[in-house]
Amino acid sequence: LIISLKSSANLIIHSFFSHVAEYLVVRYPQRTIEPYRGSSAKLSCEANYDFIKCGVVHVVWHKVEEQEKSNELTDPDQYLTTVNETISDYNWRRREVVTEIMSVARRDDGRYQCKATCDSGVQAMGHFITIKVIMKPAESLKTFGQNNHVELNICMLISCLIVFIFLD
């Protein structure tokens, strides 16, 4: 009985997702992006959908927070989004959405996901893209240099104290 229930549940889940996949699919490769702080980073996805079955589709990149809550990347001061749509076979359309984070900062570290939603509320989403912001090599050297300067001053102070102790 348990095997039968599991098989039935899997069949229902497979049927549902196959049905959704028949008219709404989001595609892009799963990857990690490591942009330098201050540079830009591009997130690109493609939604293929049947216009008759899906209607108007909303496709947007989201930053996924810790509790699976997500925020759309729509702030025009931080993001530049371009949309390109082509009509392919019959009722099918291909929408490409590219969102560029114009100046990457530490706050941009995290997981991102492209989500497409039909008029009916049916959704499809792609893999997670991870952004790990890194410092520019020049910034690393600058930070290292600043730390060395502080260490050098401490060493000089200790040396002066030792000299005064021995002279005394």
Image (spheres, rainbow, N blue to C red):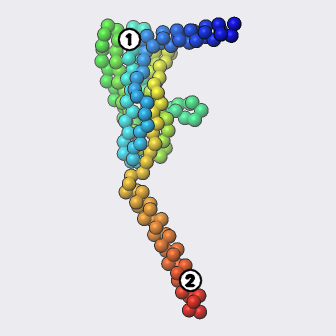
Q: Earlier in the sequence, mark 1 or mark 2?
A: 1
Q: From this viewpoint, is residue 72 visible?
A: no
Give the image location of residue 50, x and y in percent: 39, 11
Residue at the spot 51% in from the left edge and 75% down from the top edge: 155
Q: Secondary structure at mark 2?
A: helix
Q: Secondary structure at mark 1?
A: helix
Is 23 drawn above or below residue 76 in the view shown? above
Residue 61, image quadrant: top left
Give the image location of residue 152, x and y in percent: 48, 73
Task: Tell which residue pokes out farthest to the right in this image.
Answer: 1
Left or right: 163 with respect to 35? Answer: right
Residue 97, image quadrant: top left
Q: Which residue is mark 2?
A: 161
Q: Please tell me the numbered disc located at residue 17.
A: none
Q: From this viewpoint, is residue 45 visible?
A: yes
Q: How many marks?
A: 2
Give the image location of residue 94, x and y in percent: 34, 18
Name the front one of labels 1 and 2: 2
Q: Amino acid at mark 1?
A: Phe
Q: Amino acid at mark 2?
A: Leu
Whole-angstrom CA distance, mark 1 to mark 2, is 80 Å
Residue at the spot 53% in from the left edge and 83% down from the top edge: 160
Is 129 drawn above or below residue 14 in the view shown? below
Q: Please tell me the numbered disc located at residue 51.
A: 1
